[in-house]
Amino acid sequence: MTYLTRRTMLQRGGMLGAILALDAVSPALAKTTPAGSSMRFKAIDAALREGVSKNDVAGVIAVAATPKGMVYEGAFGKANVATGAPMTLDTVFWLLSMTKAFTATACMQLIEQGRVHLDDDAAKYLPELASPQILEGFAEDGTPRLRPARGAIKVRHLLTHTSGYTYSIWSEALTRYEKVTGMPDIATCKNAAFTAPLEFEPGERWEYGISMDWVGKLVEAVSDQSLEIYFRENIFAPLGMKDSGFLIGTGQKRRVASFHSRRADGGLEPAPFEMPQRPEFFMGGGGAFSTPRDYIAFLQALLNGGALRGVRILRPETVAMMMQNQIGELNVQEMHSAQSPYSRSFDQFPGQPHKWGLSFDINMQPGPNGRSAGSISWAGLLNCYFWLDPVKHVTGALFTQVLPFYDERVVALYGAFERGLYAGLA
């Protein structure tokens, strides 16, 4: 879940031929669901509608699909609190770290083509990674103490967050490093953010960080294209994802969901939000926007082994590999918040072991809300979430635009959505 500095903050899937049905409720609480499924998923409707009425969220969208097509689409509340525009399936959301799944897919396409190899030194493609430095601490005068890393960063390390790179939002040490050195955070889309040191030896442990932004740079170097163009030509256009990208158009801007911060009293405070539109680099770890309709098409392709509506973006064996444990005996650890305005501490499966694939969280035991062991999932900082269950053959995603990340009220809605989906499918 790539995060944003205070400066930055202030700045179709197939429907099985079904006709969308609209509930006879107020526009602020409207929802759409594929015909014939609304009775099965009344619990989802009720939970999301209540979340809006209680001001847990200004608006929320949930979508879900099986290999047969869409099974649930619900849009509730307001996309724009100033104009009163309702949420729709074409409302535009800033994905933040849900961008990482696109970047991983792009890298895996290059691996399929033999142009990149998982166990290559990343410096083979990005020479600037040849001599990484590790932050060991700070001298008495506050000067960072650095030493050369003993091992090389592999492509695999970048895809699995075992490279040693971190995010300051979940790192007291990197937060201090940014303050001492003036290094910009990654969400400014300034290249100087890539001067960040490692916090541990490559391969030593799992810790979430800017690794996927480096993977974005790798994709650009190998393909000789910007991520904006590469994603459009190799992922978005083939899957019909017409409202996804890094550079947002005028029409798409009019459909962007309002961003809100959670106040201490539990209320929501609207504020301007947009990812940098003149970036020094396209942020493969968190810079993209999309719509629920577009994103569920991407998830459907993964659910179907890399293909949707006759178009293939990955081979089935590649998708299977992405969903398998790629960190061996290491475990995904709780991400302890170092900057509470942006994120609460985060652990999707407290008390359970979970692993990391290429590039997804994998719950090794059944989840508390219905998903099978071996499901993959991840999220975006503005409280967007998705999961894909390869055992029960279903995928779902929930979209809001709220800080701090892992907001208790939104997480409760996400859980209710997942429970209601599995109950309805059963």
Image (cartoon, rainbow, N blue to C red):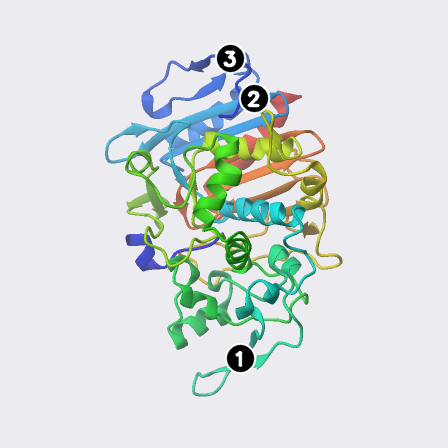
Q: Earlier in the sequence, mark 3 or mark 1?
A: 3
Which residue carries the number 2 mark? 71
Which residue is found at the position 69% from the left and 51% from the top?
355
Q: Image quadrant for the C terminus?
A: top right
**Residue 3: percent from left, percent from top:** 43, 55
Which residue carries the number 3 mark? 18
Q: Is residue 279 left or right of residue 425?
A: left
Q: Earlier in the sequence, mark 1 or mark 2?
A: 2
Kindly identify the amino acid type of the residue bearing the numbered disc 2.
Answer: Val
Distance of label 3 from label 2 (alpha carbons): 10 Å
159 or 167: which is nearer to us? 159
Element type at mark 3: loop
Distance of label 1 from label 2 (alpha carbons): 51 Å
Disc assigned to residue 217: none
- Do the numbered discs 3 and 1 sit on residues whose CB atoms are within 8 Å? no
Which of labels 3 and 1 is toward the front?
3
Res 369 visible:
no
Which residue is found at the position 46% from the left and 87% from the top?
140
**Residue 400: percent from left, percent from top:** 42, 38
Kindly identify the amino acid type of the residue bearing the numbered disc 1.
Answer: Gly
Element type at mark 1: strand
**Residue 199: percent from left, percent from top:** 57, 71
390 or 287: which is nearer to us? 287
Kindly identify the amino acid type of the residue bearing the numbered disc 3.
Answer: Ala
Which residue carries the number 1 mark? 137
> How packed is label 1: few (under 14 Cα within 10 Å), some, or many (20 or more)?
some
Which of labels 3 and 2 is toward the front?
3
Q: In which quarter of the view is residue 307 placed?
A: top right
